[in-house]
Image (spheres, rainbow, N blue to C red):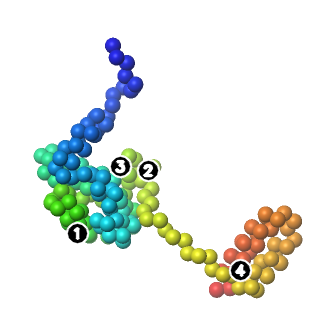
């Protein structure tokens, strides 16, 4: 008797993953293309607020459903653009590969992974503090003897004073 390295049963999707992928690719539909070229297909503005997470084929094999992950605030906007997005994805394939689109706000694997973060948000450069604010912050932190704590207090005082002066 052959001992399996798995305890219990494997998920059916795990057992059939390669066969499903090959069947899709034989129809000219490579799922990875949607993932790797997402920003080019839908545009940078849409790619910054959503990402494709799943493609499922229908029972009859005609067309697929593309599931997009987004945040709650962006879901209504994507819902209104669903048909245009579907057309863009299908234009990339040259035929009607996607027949339906579904928008979700949670990851397919569960709620804890559903904290969607899209496109890196660039931080703006810190604003220059005025010389008088810097001087006042230095005076406030001067009595502290520990150098690291004094530097941290200077930065904090500088931030607080800068915001209160505006």
Marking on residue 108? 3
User: Local crowd at mark 1 within 10 Å, few (<14), some, or many (≥20)?
Assistant: few
Secondary structure at numbered mark 1: helix
Mark 1 → mark 3, Cα distance in angstroms? 23 Å
User: Local crowd at mark 4 within 10 Å, few (<14), some, or many (≥20)?
Assistant: some
Q: Residue at x 32, y 70 (%)?
A: 43
User: Local crowd at mark 2 within 10 Å, few (<14), some, or many (≥20)?
Assistant: few
Sequence-first disc among 2 and 1: 1
State the image coordinates of residue 146 (x, y, percent, origin top left).
84, 63
Secondary structure at numbered mark 3: loop
Mark 4 → mark 3, Cα distance in angstroms? 46 Å
User: Is residue 120 among what the camera can see?
Assistant: yes
Secondary structure at numbered mark 4: helix
Q: Which quadrant, please, contains the C terminus? A: bottom right
Dots 4, 1 in contact, CB < 8 A: no
Residue with the mark numbered 4: 161
State the image coordinates of residue 84 (x, y, percent, origin top left).
23, 69
Q: Tag count in the figure?
A: 4
Question: Considering only vertical position in the picture, is 123 above or below 38?
Answer: below
Residue with the mark numbered 1: 84
State the image coordinates of residue 42 (x, y, percent, origin top left).
30, 67
User: Is residue 76 among what the camera can see?
Assistant: no
Mark 2 → mark 1, Cα distance in angstroms? 28 Å
Residue with the mark numbered 2: 113
Sequence-first disc among 2 and 4: 2
């Amino acid at each position: 008797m052959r001992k399996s390295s798995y305890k219990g049963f494997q998920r059916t999707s795990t057992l059939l993953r390669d066969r499903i992928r090959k069947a899709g690719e034989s129809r000219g539909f490579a799922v990875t293309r949607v993932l790797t070229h997402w920003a080019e297909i839908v545009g940078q503005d849409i790619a910054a607020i959503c990402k494709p997470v799943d493609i499922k084929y229908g029972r009859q094999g005609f067309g697929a459903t593309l599931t997009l992950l987004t945040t709650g605030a962006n879901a209504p906007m994507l819902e209104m653009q669903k048909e245009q997005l579907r057309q863009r994805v299908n234009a990339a394939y040259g035929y009607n590969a996607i027949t339906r689109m579904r928008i979700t706000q949670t990851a397919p694997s569960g709620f804890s992974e559903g904290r969607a973060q899209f496109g890196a948000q660039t931080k703006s450069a810190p604003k220059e503090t005025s010389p008088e604010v810097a001087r006042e912050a230095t005076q406030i932190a001067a009595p502290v003897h520990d150098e690291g704590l004094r530097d941290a207090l200077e930065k904090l005082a500088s931030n607080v004073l800068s915001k209160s002066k505006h």
